[in-house]
C-alpha cells in the first residue's frame, strides 16, 4: 500500500524532459494498459487515447496549446471523450458528463502509471480544441479533453503548496 501513496506524492508537473531519452515502448504500453484499466461509466470506456511520438505532430500540438514545452516531450497522449458512446446508454447526462469523466479518469490513471514507470508528466487542459481537432484529423464523434506530456524529467520542481484537508473535505456523521 505504501508504494501507491508514495507514487501519488512523487507526481509533479514537469515541463522539461531529457532530450535524448525516449519513452521505451514497453513502458508506454504499460502506461496505456493502466489507463484503459480505469473505471468508466457502465464500463463503456467512452474515450480514445491518441499516442503522439512524431516530432512534427508534437510541435503542431504545442502550437494548438500555445505551450512550447509540449514539443519537447517524447510522447504526448491526447485523451478524447466519445460522448455518443455514453449517450446511447445514459442519455444527455452520459453525453455531457460521463464521457468526460471517463476520459479524465483514464488520464489520471495514466499520469500515476508514468510516475510508477520512473518518468514524469504534465497534464495540459489549455488548448484550442478546434485547432487540435484539425491537427489530429479527429473523427467528429471525439472531443479532445486533455493532453498528457510524458518523458524522463530534466528538472525536479519544488512541490506546490496544497490546501489543508479541512478546507476541502467536509465530514458528515
Image (tube, rainbow, N blue to C red):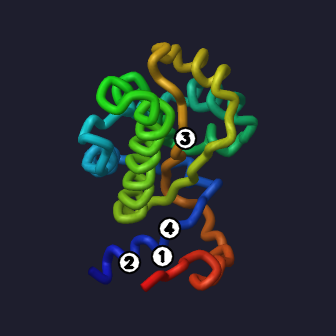
Q: Which residue is mark 4?
A: 11
Q: CA distance from mark 2 to mark 4?
A: 10 Å
Going from the N terminus, do you reach mark 3 or mark 4 first? Answer: 4
Q: Position of residue 152 (x, y in %)?
A: 49, 57
Q: Position of residue 115 (x, y in %)?
A: 42, 63
- The 10 Å Cα crowd at callout 1, few under 14, some 14 to 19, many 20 or more, is few
- The 10 Å Cα crowd at callout 4, few under 14, some 14 to 19, many 20 or more, is some
- Please give the name of the residue rendered at 54% of the width and 37% of the height, measured from the top-left corner: 145
**Helix, strand or loop status at disc 4:** loop
Tell me the number on the disc at residue 9.
Answer: 1
Q: Which residue is mark 3?
A: 147
Can you say whether 94 is above or below 132 in the image? below
Can you say whether 86 is above or below 154 in the image? above
Q: Which residue is mark 2?
A: 5
In the rendered structure, are the residues bearing label 1 and label 2 in contact, judged by CB atoms less than 8 Å apart? Answer: yes
Going from the N terminus, do you reach mark 3 or mark 1 first? Answer: 1
Going from the N terminus, do you reach mark 3 or mark 2 first? Answer: 2
Q: Residue furthest right?
A: 66
- Please give the name of the residue rendered at 49% of the width and 82% of the height, measured from the top-left corner: 171
**Helix, strand or loop status at disc 1:** helix
- Please give the name of the residue rendered at 57% of the width and 48% of the height, measured from the top-left corner: 19
In the rendered structure, are the residues bearing label 4 and label 1 in contact, judged by CB atoms less than 8 Å apart? Answer: yes
Q: CA distance from mark 3 to mark 1?
A: 21 Å
Q: Position of residue 117 (x, y in %)?
A: 35, 60
Q: Between residues 91 and 61, which one lies in front from this camera angle?
A: 91
- Please give the name of the residue rendered at 62% of the width and 43% of the height, measured from the top-left corner: 125
Can you say whether 94 is above or below 31 in the image? above
Q: Position of residue 172 (x, y in %)?
A: 47, 81
Amino acid at each position: 500500500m505504501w508504494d501507491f501513496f508514495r507514487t501519488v506524492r512523487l507526481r509533479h508537473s514537469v515541463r522539461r524532459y531529457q532530450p535524448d531519452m525516449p519513452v521505451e515502448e514497453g513502458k508506454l504500453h504499460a502506461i496505456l494498459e493502466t489507463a484503459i484499466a480505469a473505471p468508466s461509466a457502465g464500463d463503456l470506456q467512452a474515450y480514445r487515447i491518441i499516442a503522439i511520438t512524431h516530432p512534427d505532430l508534437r510541435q503542431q500540438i504545442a502550437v494548438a496549446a500555445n505551450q512550447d514545452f509540449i514539443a519537447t516531450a517524447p510522447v504526448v497522449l491526447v485523451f478524447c471523450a466519445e460522448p455518443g458512446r455514453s449517450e446511447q446508454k445514459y442519455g444527455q447526462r452520459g453525453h455531457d458528463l460521463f464521457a468526460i469523466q471517463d476520459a479524465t479518469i483514464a488520464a489520471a490513471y495514466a499520469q500515476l502509471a508514468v510516475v510508477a514507470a520512473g518518468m514524469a508528466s504534465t497534464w495540459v487542459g489549455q488548448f484550442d480544441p478546434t485547432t487540435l481537432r484539425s491537427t489530429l484529423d479527429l473523427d467528429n464523434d471525439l472531443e479532445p479533453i486533455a493532453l498528457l506530456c510524458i518523458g524522463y524529467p530534466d528538472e525536479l520542481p519544488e512541490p506546490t503548496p496544497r490546501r489543508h484537508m479541512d478546507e476541502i473535505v467536509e465530514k458528515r456523521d
